[in-house]
Image (cartoon, rainbow, N blue to C red):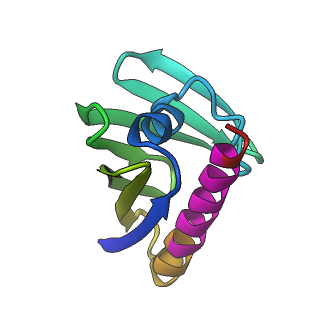
């Protein structure tokens, strides 16, 4: 299992950050996604720009504090933990992914891939917040 964590301080209140991150119906701000599909209250699917699907199952939702889900696609299984901490008018976030590659050939590349994806996610989130 490979683990990667990214932390950031975002210059918006925790409610605004939370509402963007957890609104799975509106992921237009994500540069890596072409669409999302809500399956039910606890399950959704994200599709990359190439149409590759990843299924997410929410395992914990503490509004404006913590959001967790399991994730799975043809290449990996894993777990994502997001924590949100108010800091006055700003919000400290910490996003941790724990992933196991299903294919042995992918294992050496997982850490670098996760870091790149997490950095992109934070940049996309910052851009979305700037538009608010």
> Which of 113 and 22 lies nearest the eye of the viewer?
22
Q: How many marks?
A: 0
Taking the image as shown, residue 115 lies to the left or right of residue 99, namely right
Give residue 53's quadrant in the image. Answer: top right
Magenta extent: 115-129
Which quadrant of the rendered structure holds the N terminus? bottom left
Vertical order, 8 against 39 (above or below): below
Q: Residue furthest bottom?
A: 108
Q: Residue furthest top?
A: 40
Residue at 58% from the left image edge and 64% from the top image edge: 117
Taking the image as shown, residue 59 lies to the left or right of residue 130, namely left
Q: Position of residue 11 (x, y in %)?
A: 53, 55
Q: Position of residue 118 (x, y in %)?
A: 53, 65
Residue 7 falls inside the magenta stretch: no
**Main secondary structure along the magenta-highlighted residues:** helix
Q: Position of residue 26 (x, y in %)?
A: 63, 27
Can residue 105 be seen at all in this image of the molecule?
no
């Amino acid at each position: 299992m490979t683990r990667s964590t990214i932390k950031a301080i975002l210059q918006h209140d925790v409610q605004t950050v939370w509402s963007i991150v957890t609104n799975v119906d509106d992921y237009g701000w994500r540069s890596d996604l072409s669409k999302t599909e809500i399956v039910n209250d606890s399950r959704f699917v994200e599709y990359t720009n190439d149409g590759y699907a990843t299924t997410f199952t929410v395992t914990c939702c503490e509004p404006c504090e913590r959001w967790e889900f399991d994730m799975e696609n043809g290449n990996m299984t894993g777990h994502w933990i997001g924590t949100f901490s108010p800091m006055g008018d700003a919000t400290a976030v910490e996003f941790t992914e724990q992933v196991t590659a299903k294919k042995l050939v992918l294992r050496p590349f997982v850490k670098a891939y996760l870091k790149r994806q997490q950095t992109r996610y934070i940049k996309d989130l910052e851009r979305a917040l700037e538009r608010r």
